[in-house]
Amino acid sequence: MQELISILKKETYSEDHYIIDKISSFVLNSRIDELFLQANNCIEDENFSEALLFYNLILKEDSKNIHALIDRGITLQNLGRIKSAIRSYDKALNISSNNLDALINKGSAFHLDGKYSDAIFCYDVALKIDKKHPMALAYKGLSLAELGRLTEAIDYFKNALSIDKHYHLAQISRDTAQELLKSIQEKNI
């Protein structure tokens, strides 16, 4: 018995064990890839509930799959389940605290929930990681605008456009915020 325990502790693998482990890993990855394809097909058909089932299956196979956690969060957000989406993003961030996709999507979920200050916090964390991330800049501008901070919002939209001049969301948001600001200023005259 002692001999068996000592062998297990050393985790000595033969070449056969190594090959079996590699094959198992390949099969698992192929299965996960297939589940992602099925989930994406559901998303394309706007069948979010079914896509959610596939993401849950992926997470059953690999509970730390960051892409599945983020995609699951986005899907939950599309279903209007904002608090569940935020929990999914938090799980991804617990695994990888600097994941820009998780941070920006978490901010977007807070924004949809009307928690603009929380959204801005997420965007600020993302911008500390990548200060030239156009989506984080534009989304922060949207949250600032919701708080009535139009001048600051316009600056963020302009910053996003200085990085990506074709970023449609930033263009429309900048133009709308400028028109709104002009309208407010005209009323105050």
Image (cartoon, helix red, strand yellow):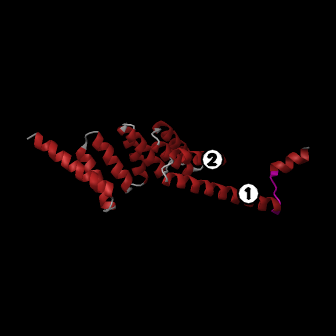
Quadrant showing the N terminus: top right
Amino acid type, mark 2: Leu
The residue lying at 62 percent from left, 49 percent from top is 58
Instruction: Specify the label residue 69 is tagged with.
Output: none
User: Label 2: how many residues lie within 10 Å, few (<14), some (14-19) or many (20+)?
Assistant: some
Residue at figure coordinates x 74%, y 60% from the top left: 23
Q: Which residues are magenta?
A: 10-15
Q: Position of residue 49 (x, y in %)?
A: 53, 44
**Dot 1 surroundings within 10 Å: few (below 14), some, or many (20 or more)?**
few
Horizontal side, residue 58 vs residue 159: left or right: right
Q: Which mark is residue 57?
A: 2
Asked if one can make out residue 172 in the rendered structure from this viewpoint, the answer is yes
- 186 displayed left or right of 23: left
Q: Is residue 44 above or below residue 144?
A: below
Estimate the x, y position of residue 110 in percent, counting from the top left: 41, 40
| Image x and y of residue 123, in percent | 39, 47
Q: How many marks?
A: 2
Residue 14 horizontal side relative to residue 45, left or right: right
Mark closer to the observer (2, 1)? 2
| Residue 167, image x, y percentages | 33, 59
Picture quadrant of residue 56: top right
> What secondary structure is found at the residue carrying circle 2?
helix
The amino acid marked with disc number 1 is Ser
Does the stretch in magenta take in 14?
A: yes
Q: Which residue is mark 1?
A: 24
